[in-house]
């Protein structure tokens, strides 16, 4: 690859979280190589101009490093990636930028044309990244789940998002599913797991601490995690079958404790982990960590 080709291929990407934003430059033609990155804390409750400046800050710092084809931005929902606007309804963040033309606002701060700014859902970007360069490489029909403060999902067919039709939940979002009449995230999420553990143990522990206790033989902690993973598998199983999933990839902060959650989740899905029995899909932990949505956002740009 010549230097000129390399430069033309470089995509600027951003991964926007609830309290942090990461910007990076990526060469998607070289296995999603992250050339450079920069992150910064953001205040999701700041006023409009301050929040926009915080979101654009790391990207502005990288913008002069290489010629870019544009910026691909992984955004949390509720957000309309095509329109470039979000309601952020039901979440305690980003209210100052709800309803605005975020594409135009960020394009102005990044000094590019609005057409050079595109968006993708953050959970979908995560899944595409894992499909392109991580644990999902080679999967024809893949389900990627991200477990943290919520439950993100991406149903991918040959790396392309599928969010309509009878084989996926509404909008392809599993957090809309119900368990015992309640939203899935009331049972499977960091806050829900911490509440369940507090009710059992009387302790105020993080999910990482609960998993560490389970690993050390704490029966109650183990039961809390197993209950959450069984609920997740119950919610997912019909859609794994309907979509014809051949690989389930699980990422996010909770998946860092794969030795604790992998077995009960696999048992609930009827899988044995990698190389599951018969024609059942494989179940694997994500491989790229925090780089997954960055790589996925760049891949989404080039495929578009």
Image (cartoon, helix red, strand yellow):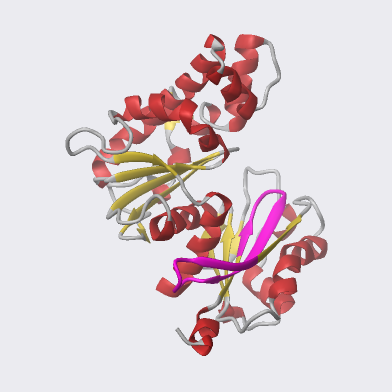
Pick the quarter of the image with the C terminus. bottom left
The number of numbered badges drawn on the structure is 0
On the question of residue 92 being in view, the answer is yes
> Would you place residue 108 above or below residue 136 in this image?
below
> Would you place residue 241 above or below residue 27 in this image?
above
Pick the front one: 214 or 226: 214
Pick the front one: 219 or 215: 215
Q: Quadrant of residue 145?
A: top left
Q: Is residue 24 magenta?
A: yes
Pick the quarter of the image with the N terminus. bottom left
Q: Is residue 225 magenta?
A: no
Q: Is residue 139 left or right of residue 88?
A: left
Residue at image x 69%, y 14%? 203
Q: Is residue 83 left or right of residue 231?
A: right
On the question of residue 101 being in view, the answer is no
Q: At which x and y percent is residue 294?
A: 55, 61
Pick the front one: 164 or 31: 31
Q: Is residue 181 left or right of residue 92?
A: left
Residue at image x 50%, y 52%? 288
Pick the front one: 38 or 120: 38
Q: At which x and y percent is residue 110?
A: 70, 77
The magenta span reads 14-36
Residue at image x 65%, y 52%? 17
> Would you place residue 250 above or below residue 264 in this image?
below
């Amino acid at each position: 690859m010549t230097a000129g080709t390399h430069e033309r291929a470089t995509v600027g990407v951003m991964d926007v979280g609830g309290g942090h934003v990461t910007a990076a430059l990526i060469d998607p033609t070289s296995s999603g190589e992250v050339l450079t990155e920069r992150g910064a804390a953001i205040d999701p409750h700041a006023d409009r101009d301050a929040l926009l400046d915080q979101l654009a800050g790391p990207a502005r710092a990288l913008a002069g490093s290489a010629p870019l084809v544009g910026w691909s931005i992984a955004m949390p929902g509720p957000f309309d990636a095509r329109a470039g606007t979000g309601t952020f309804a039901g979440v305690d963040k980003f209210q100052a930028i709800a309803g605005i033309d975020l594409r135009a606002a960020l394009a102005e701060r990044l000094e590019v044309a609005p057409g050079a700014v595109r968006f993708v859902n953050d959970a979908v970007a995560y899944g595409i990244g894992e499909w392109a360069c991580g644990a999902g490489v080679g999967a024809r029909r893949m389900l990627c789940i991200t477990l943290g403060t919520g439950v993100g999902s991406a149903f991918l067919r040959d790396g392309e998002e599928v969010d309509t039709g009878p084989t996926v939940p509404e909008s392809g979002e599993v957090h809309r599913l119900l368990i015992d009449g309640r939203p899935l995230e009331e049972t499977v999420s960091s806050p829900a797991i911490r509440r369940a553990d507090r009710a059992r143990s009387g302790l105020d522990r993080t999910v990482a601490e609960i998993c560490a206790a389970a690993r050390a033989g704490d029966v109650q902690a183990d039961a809390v995690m197993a209950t959450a993973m069984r609920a997740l598998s119950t919610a997912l199983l019909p859609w794994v079958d309907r979509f014809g999933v051949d690989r389930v990839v699980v990422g996010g902060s909770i998946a860092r404790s794969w030795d604790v959650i992998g077995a009960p989740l696999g048992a609930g899905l009827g899988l044995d982990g990698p190389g599951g029995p018969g024609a059942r899909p494989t179940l694997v932990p994500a491989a790229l960590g925090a780089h997954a949505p960055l790589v996925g956002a760049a891949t989404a740009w080039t495929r578009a």
